Amino acid sequence: MKLSTRELVTVAVFGTLWGIVEISIGSVLKSLNIPFSGIILATMGLIIALVGRVFVPKKGSTIFIGIVAVLLKLFSLGGVILGPMIGIVTEALVAEIILTISGKPRRFSFILTGALGVTWVLVQPFFTGPLFFGRSFFVIWLDLLDTGNRLFSLKADAALWIVAALLASHLFVGGVVGWLGWDIADQLRLRLGRAKIEDIEIIESKLNEDL
């Protein structure tokens, strides 16, 4: 993959936006101990990454946006925060894989990217907890059940229902993120005097027919 100077600058801009969100809003959420701060940051970061992919629709651009965001996260208050950094990289990687497989930007691929990216917030503690923070699966599992109990007023012994409810809620929120990312990208393109995303393929097909 080769990016032009303009595309590299665009990638850097969106990566910087994601990093600023993590540094500023992330620090505030952490200091105030706001519940579900991971979901809030994931939604904002994924929207930025998805919009960036529309403006640089090339393989690798989304993961580069995530890398720029991680580099900026190094300057976050409190030093290197490993969990959020892993989250950023993984969310960017998930987005990169889905968007690369789908080819040209499409609303469905954006929705799927958002759904899986936000759902990673639910899954990540089971990987990072034992590997980096010395937490056992059992403790993480109990925290998950406690979260479901507080959020949905389900009893802790209804484990299957809690997991299903949490999974469904994360997928739904992520799907909304993908939908919004698509619409925001469309509006930005219109404000910049460019064609809507859906019209790009139509224009390209007509050009190919003329050739």
Image: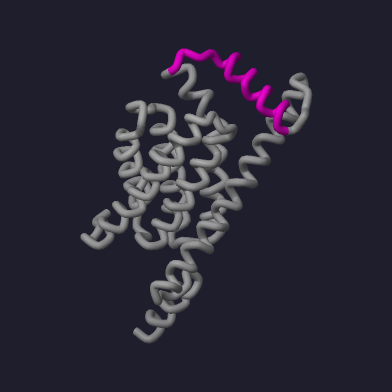
Residue numbers of the magenta segment:
133-151
Can you say which quadrant of the picture contains the C terminus? bottom left
Q: x, y percentage for residue 128?
A: 46, 23
At x 43%, y 70%, the residue is 189
Whether residue 120 is visible, yes or no, is: no
At x 74%, y 33%, the residue is 152
In the orientation shown, which residue stands out farthest toward the bottom?
A: 210
Relative height, residue 81 to residue 188 (above, below): above
Q: Is residue 147 magenta?
A: yes
In the orientation shown, which residue stands out farthest toward the left?
A: 5
Q: Is residue 24 magenta?
A: no
Whether residue 77 is visible, yes or no, is: yes
At x 44%, y 52%, the residue is 48
By secondary structure, the bulk of the magenta-drawn segment is best described as: helix
**Quadrant assignment, res 2:** bottom left
Q: x, y percentage for residue 176?
A: 60, 52
- Along the viewing direction, whichever of 203 and 153 lies nearer the viewer: 153
Can you say which quadrant of the picture contains the N terminus? bottom left
Lateral position of residue 203 relative to residue 120, left or right: left
Lateral position of residue 70 relative to residue 167, left or right: left
Q: x, y percentage for residue 27?
A: 43, 34
Relative height, residue 83 to residue 107 (above, below): above
At x 67%, y 34%, the residue is 166
Q: x, y percentage for residue 59?
A: 35, 53
